[in-house]
Amino acid sequence: LESLDTLGGAVVVRTPLEELRAPVAVVTCGASAPKVLTTHAALPKLTVTQEQVFHFAPADPEHAWPSFIHHRDPFVYGLETPGEGVKVAEHHTGPQTDPDARDFVVDPAGRDRVAAYVAEWLPGLTLPAAGETTCLYATTATQNFVIDRADPLVVGAGFSGHGFKFTPVVGRLLADLVAGEPGLPRFALDGR
Protein backbone atom coordinates (compact mmCIF):
# COMPACT_ATOMS: atom_id res chain seq x y z
CA LEU A 1 0.00 0.00 0.00
CA GLU A 2 1.44 3.34 -1.05
CA SER A 3 -1.58 5.46 -0.24
CA LEU A 4 -5.25 5.44 0.64
CA ASP A 5 -7.31 8.49 -0.29
CA THR A 6 -10.95 9.47 -0.42
CA LEU A 7 -11.94 11.64 -3.37
CA GLY A 8 -15.46 12.73 -4.26
CA GLY A 9 -17.09 10.11 -2.05
CA ALA A 10 -14.99 7.27 -3.45
CA VAL A 11 -11.83 5.47 -2.37
CA VAL A 12 -8.53 5.49 -4.24
CA VAL A 13 -5.97 2.86 -3.26
CA ARG A 14 -2.47 3.07 -4.73
CA THR A 15 -0.03 0.16 -4.66
CA PRO A 16 3.35 -0.13 -6.39
CA LEU A 17 1.58 -1.96 -9.23
CA GLU A 18 -1.74 -0.21 -9.72
CA GLU A 19 -4.34 2.32 -8.70
CA LEU A 20 -7.76 1.04 -7.67
CA ARG A 21 -10.97 3.06 -7.32
CA ALA A 22 -14.15 1.95 -5.61
CA PRO A 23 -17.27 3.49 -4.09
CA VAL A 24 -16.51 1.69 -0.78
CA ALA A 25 -13.42 -0.06 0.59
CA VAL A 26 -12.97 -2.30 3.61
CA VAL A 27 -9.80 -1.44 5.53
CA THR A 28 -8.50 -4.07 7.96
CA CYS A 29 -4.80 -3.42 8.35
CA GLY A 30 -4.08 -4.56 11.89
CA ALA A 31 -1.51 -2.63 13.88
CA SER A 32 -1.00 -0.24 10.94
CA ALA A 33 -4.59 1.06 11.19
CA PRO A 34 -3.72 4.24 13.11
CA LYS A 35 -1.16 5.27 10.46
CA VAL A 36 -3.20 4.22 7.43
CA LEU A 37 -6.46 5.74 8.65
CA THR A 38 -5.13 8.81 10.47
CA THR A 39 -6.81 11.34 8.16
CA HIS A 40 -9.81 9.20 7.22
CA ALA A 41 -11.40 7.86 10.41
CA ALA A 42 -11.37 8.93 14.04
CA LEU A 43 -10.20 5.66 15.53
CA PRO A 44 -10.21 5.19 19.28
CA LYS A 45 -6.69 4.96 20.68
CA LEU A 46 -5.12 1.64 19.71
CA THR A 47 -2.26 0.32 21.82
CA VAL A 48 0.12 -1.77 19.72
CA THR A 49 2.15 -4.45 21.48
CA GLN A 50 4.69 -6.99 20.26
CA GLU A 51 3.60 -10.40 21.48
CA GLN A 52 5.29 -13.77 21.04
CA VAL A 53 4.12 -17.27 20.25
CA PHE A 54 5.79 -20.65 20.50
CA HIS A 55 5.11 -23.90 18.67
CA PHE A 56 5.71 -27.23 20.39
CA ALA A 57 5.80 -30.66 18.80
CA PRO A 58 3.34 -33.17 20.24
CA ALA A 59 4.98 -36.25 21.76
CA ASP A 60 2.40 -38.28 19.82
CA PRO A 61 1.78 -36.69 16.41
CA GLU A 62 -1.43 -38.73 16.02
CA HIS A 63 -2.99 -37.10 19.08
CA ALA A 64 -5.43 -34.26 18.27
CA TRP A 65 -4.97 -31.19 20.47
CA PRO A 66 -7.87 -29.08 21.68
CA SER A 67 -7.79 -25.31 21.67
CA PHE A 68 -7.67 -23.85 25.16
CA ILE A 69 -7.64 -20.64 27.15
CA HIS A 70 -6.27 -20.88 30.68
CA HIS A 71 -7.63 -18.02 32.79
CA ARG A 72 -4.67 -17.27 35.01
CA ASP A 73 -2.24 -14.39 35.36
CA PRO A 74 -1.22 -14.04 32.61
CA PHE A 75 -3.79 -15.76 30.40
CA VAL A 76 -2.25 -18.59 28.39
CA TYR A 77 -3.85 -19.99 25.26
CA GLY A 78 -3.06 -22.70 22.77
CA LEU A 79 -4.26 -24.33 19.59
CA GLU A 80 -3.04 -26.86 17.12
CA THR A 81 -1.47 -25.25 14.07
CA PRO A 82 -1.22 -27.70 11.15
CA GLY A 83 2.38 -28.16 10.05
CA GLU A 84 3.77 -26.16 12.98
CA GLY A 85 2.71 -28.06 16.10
CA VAL A 86 0.76 -26.73 19.05
CA LYS A 87 0.89 -22.95 19.41
CA VAL A 88 1.16 -21.83 23.05
CA ALA A 89 1.40 -18.19 24.12
CA GLU A 90 0.71 -15.70 26.87
CA HIS A 91 -1.98 -13.13 26.09
CA HIS A 92 -1.19 -9.41 26.32
CA THR A 93 2.22 -9.53 27.97
CA GLY A 94 4.35 -7.85 25.30
CA PRO A 95 5.82 -4.35 25.29
CA GLN A 96 4.26 -1.44 23.41
CA THR A 97 5.88 -0.89 20.03
CA ASP A 98 5.68 0.99 16.76
CA PRO A 99 4.68 -1.51 14.04
CA ASP A 100 7.24 0.03 11.68
CA ALA A 101 10.09 -0.16 14.22
CA ARG A 102 9.52 -3.44 16.06
CA ASP A 103 12.56 -5.59 16.74
CA PHE A 104 11.08 -9.08 16.14
CA VAL A 105 13.16 -10.37 19.09
CA VAL A 106 11.59 -12.99 21.35
CA ASP A 107 11.91 -12.07 25.03
CA PRO A 108 13.96 -14.78 26.82
CA ALA A 109 11.97 -14.36 30.07
CA GLY A 110 8.72 -14.89 28.14
CA ARG A 111 10.19 -17.95 26.44
CA ASP A 112 11.13 -19.36 29.86
CA ARG A 113 7.65 -18.68 31.30
CA VAL A 114 5.92 -20.44 28.41
CA ALA A 115 8.34 -23.39 28.56
CA ALA A 116 7.68 -23.71 32.32
CA TYR A 117 3.93 -23.58 31.63
CA VAL A 118 4.22 -26.33 29.01
CA ALA A 119 6.30 -28.48 31.38
CA GLU A 120 3.69 -28.11 34.15
CA TRP A 121 0.40 -28.19 32.24
CA LEU A 122 1.01 -29.85 28.85
CA PRO A 123 3.03 -33.04 29.33
CA GLY A 124 2.05 -34.26 25.86
CA LEU A 125 4.22 -31.59 24.23
CA THR A 126 7.98 -31.82 23.80
CA LEU A 127 10.45 -29.21 24.99
CA PRO A 128 12.08 -27.02 23.83
CA ALA A 129 9.78 -25.14 21.45
CA ALA A 130 10.16 -26.21 17.83
CA GLY A 131 9.54 -22.65 16.65
CA GLU A 132 8.98 -19.14 17.91
CA THR A 133 7.99 -15.81 16.46
CA THR A 134 6.58 -12.42 17.34
CA CYS A 135 3.32 -10.83 16.27
CA LEU A 136 1.45 -7.59 16.88
CA TYR A 137 -1.71 -6.88 18.84
CA ALA A 138 -3.68 -3.66 18.30
CA THR A 139 -6.02 -3.16 21.24
CA THR A 140 -8.62 -0.56 22.23
CA ALA A 141 -8.90 0.58 25.86
CA THR A 142 -12.09 -1.48 26.23
CA GLN A 143 -10.68 -4.44 24.25
CA ASN A 144 -13.78 -4.15 22.01
CA PHE A 145 -13.26 -4.46 18.29
CA VAL A 146 -13.75 -1.47 15.98
CA ILE A 147 -16.15 -2.41 13.16
CA ASP A 148 -17.77 0.69 11.72
CA ARG A 149 -18.16 2.87 8.66
CA ALA A 150 -16.50 6.22 8.00
CA ASP A 151 -17.86 6.91 4.52
CA PRO A 152 -16.64 5.66 2.11
CA LEU A 153 -14.45 3.41 4.29
CA VAL A 154 -15.54 0.40 6.29
CA VAL A 155 -13.08 -0.09 9.14
CA GLY A 156 -12.12 -3.24 11.03
CA ALA A 157 -9.47 -2.69 13.72
CA GLY A 158 -8.46 -3.34 17.31
CA PHE A 159 -8.82 -7.10 17.15
CA SER A 160 -6.37 -7.64 20.03
CA GLY A 161 -4.75 -10.68 18.49
CA HIS A 162 -7.96 -12.72 18.40
CA GLY A 163 -10.11 -11.29 15.64
CA PHE A 164 -9.47 -14.40 13.53
CA LYS A 165 -11.50 -16.43 16.03
CA PHE A 166 -14.52 -14.39 15.01
CA THR A 167 -13.90 -14.38 11.25
CA PRO A 168 -17.43 -15.43 10.20
CA VAL A 169 -19.21 -12.79 12.30
CA VAL A 170 -16.62 -10.06 11.61
CA GLY A 171 -16.95 -10.75 7.89
CA ARG A 172 -20.74 -10.53 8.12
CA LEU A 173 -20.60 -7.24 10.08
CA LEU A 174 -18.15 -5.71 7.59
CA ALA A 175 -20.28 -6.87 4.63
CA ASP A 176 -23.41 -5.42 6.25
CA LEU A 177 -21.65 -2.05 6.62
CA VAL A 178 -20.60 -2.15 2.95
CA ALA A 179 -24.27 -2.76 2.07
CA GLY A 180 -25.31 0.30 4.09
CA GLU A 181 -26.66 -1.51 7.15
CA PRO A 182 -26.11 0.19 10.52
CA GLY A 183 -23.25 -1.01 12.69
CA LEU A 184 -23.39 -2.25 16.25
CA PRO A 185 -22.89 0.53 18.83
CA ARG A 186 -20.48 -1.63 20.83
CA PHE A 187 -18.02 -1.62 17.90
CA ALA A 188 -18.47 2.03 16.85
CA LEU A 189 -15.51 4.24 16.00
CA ASP A 190 -16.40 6.51 18.89
CA GLY A 191 -16.29 3.57 21.33
CA ARG A 192 -19.87 4.13 22.57
Image: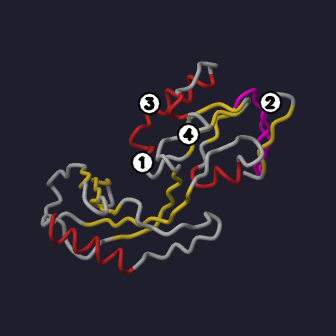
Sooner in the amino-acid sequence: mark 4 or mark 3: 4
The reply, left or right, for residue 108 in relation to residue 176 is: left
Which of the 4 image quarters holds residue 48? bottom right
Q: What element carries label 4?
A: strand
Sooner in the amino-acid sequence: mark 2 or mark 3: 2
Q: How far apart are marks 1 and 3 (CA)?
A: 13 Å
Label 3: which residue? 169
Which of the 4 image quarters holds residue 154? top right
Sooner in the amino-acid sequence: mark 1 or mark 3: 1
Tags 2 and 3 touching, CB below 8 Å:
no
Sooner in the amino-acid sequence: mark 2 or mark 1: 2
Q: Is mark 2 on a helix, strand or loop?
A: strand
Residue 10 is tagged as 2
Rendered residue at 43%/68% (across/down): 133
Label 4: which residue? 146
Circle 2 crowding by C-alpha within 10 Å: few under 14, some 14–19, many from 20: some
Question: Looking at numbered disc 3 in the image, what kind of residue is underneath it?
Answer: Val
Write down the region rendered in magenta. Answer: 11-24
Rendered residue at 19%/52% (across/down): 65
Residue 89 location (% of width, % of height): 33, 63
Question: Looking at numbered disc 2 in the image, what kind of residue is underneath it?
Answer: Ala
